[in-house]
Image: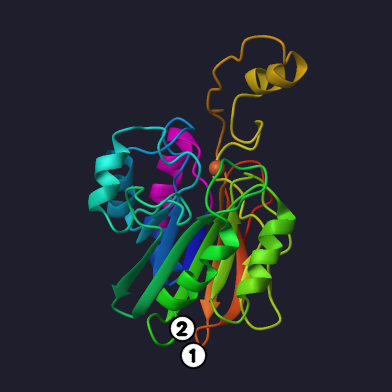
């Protein structure tokens, strides 16, 4: 199967750009599925029900999130009824919504898990404790044909450790949250595709997607009252990875996709 995962959408301009692009990319790249991290899609903080609906209408199959999932309160009732919008699996028991889901497509069944790491992140259950649940629910060729884990976190060491811990048992482990793409996309020893961070889909003439002046002032004058961060509105770059699986459900290839804006562009065939 061929699946496109798109990194953290930051704000309206990136949202519109990505929604327009995925319509075209699905046919052009012959994609079986599209998964998008939307946790910063609403003005940089959280996501709303109507934004989720727009992504599903545009062709996204599953949406993932992270620490900002609850920033817009109206998402609570929406996520309770929607099994294609995920929140991190390791949030405390009783949290609304799902952290793992499966979707039956015409060409096979995909499984997606969303999990948050522990280092330098808000408190959640221990991330490595959730591995048995992921492996059980997303067992390749038993429960799903393709599985992807979105690991939302700050520390590259922890993300690499998790990637290697899952190696050989899931199709892909992709990192999100830092908003900066890494160049370490690879197939791990036992066949799992891995990248430490896919990068955000947003304006790279910014500080992780936010207006440079406000973000910089927070570092220069930490004693001042924190000003509200606004999304940077320059031309966005879509950042994603395309993962192709083999007949065993492991990965054949992982290819970065960067379209629009300031970053080096991927040339599409
Ligand atoms: Fe995040």
Determine the secondary structure under disc 2: loop
Q: Classify residue 7 as left or right of residue 165.
A: left
Give the residue displayed 29% in from the left and 74% down from the top: 104
Residue 116 versus residue 247 in the image, above or below: above
Secondary structure mostly taken by the magenta-highlighted segment of the chain: helix
Q: Does the magenta segment cover residue 19?
A: yes
Q: Classify residue 120 as left or right of residue 5.
A: right
Q: Which residues are magenta?
A: 7-22
Residue highlighted by disc 2: 140
All told, the count of numbered labels is: 2
Give the residue displayed 44% in from the left and 46% down from the top: 38
- Residue 70 seen in the figure: yes
Q: Position of residue 95 (x, y in %)?
A: 36, 48
Residue 70 versus residue 224 in the image, above or below: below
Q: Does the magenta segment cover residue 185?
A: no
Residue 186 versus residue 203 in the image, above or below: below
Give the residue displayed 59% in from the left and 34% down from the top: 209
Q: Classify residue 29 as left or right of residue 199.
A: left
Residue 247 — which label? 1
**Occupied quadrant, residue 17:** top left
Crowding at label 2, few (<14), some or many (≥20) Cα neighbours within 10 Å? many
Q: Earlier in the sequence, mark 2 or mark 1?
A: 2
Determine the secondary structure under disc 1: loop
Give the residue displayed 60% in from the left and 82% down from the top: 168
- Of residue 2 and residue 26, the one placed in the foreground of this image is 2
Residue furthest right in the image = 220
From mark 2 to mark 1, how far is it between C-alphas? 10 Å
- Residue 268 seen in the figure: no
**Quadrant for the N terminus in the image:** bottom left
Q: Position of residue 69 (x, y in %)?
A: 43, 41
Crowding at label 1, few (<14), some or many (≥20) Cα neighbours within 10 Å? few
């Amino acid at each position: 199967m061929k699946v496109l995962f798109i990194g953290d959408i930051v704000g309206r301009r990136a949202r519109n750009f990505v929604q327009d692009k995925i319509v075209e990319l699905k046919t052009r790249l012959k994609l079986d599925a599209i998964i998008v991290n939307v946790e910063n899609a609403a003005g940089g903080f959280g996501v709303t029900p109507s934004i989720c609906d727009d992504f599903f209408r545009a062709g996204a199959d599953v949406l993932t999130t992270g620490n900002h999932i609850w920033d817009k309160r109206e998402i609570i009732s929406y996520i309770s009824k929607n099994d294609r919008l995920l929140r991190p699996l390791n949030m405390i028991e009783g949290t609304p919504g799902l952290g793992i889901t499966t979707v039956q497509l015409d060409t096979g069944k995909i499984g997606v898990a969303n999990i948050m790491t522990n280092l330098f992140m808000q408190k959640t259950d221990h991330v490595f404790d959730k591995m048995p649940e992921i492996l059980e629910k997303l067992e390749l060729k038993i429960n799903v044909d393709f599985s992807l884990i979105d690991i939302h976190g700050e520390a590259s060491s922890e993300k690499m450790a998790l990637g290697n811990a899952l190696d050989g048992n899931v199709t892909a482990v992709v990192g999100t949250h830092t908003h900066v793409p890494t160049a370490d996309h690879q197939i791990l020893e036992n066949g799992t595709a891995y990248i430490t961070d896919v990068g955000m889909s947003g304006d790279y003439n910014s500080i992780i997607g936010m207006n440079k002046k406000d973000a910089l002032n927070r570092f220069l004058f930490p004693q001042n009252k924190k000003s509200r961060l606004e999304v940077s509105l320059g031309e966005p770059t879509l950042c994603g990875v395309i993962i192709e699986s083999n007949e065993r459900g492991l990965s054949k290839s992982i290819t970065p996709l960067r379209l629009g804006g300031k970053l080096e562009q991927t040339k599409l065939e």
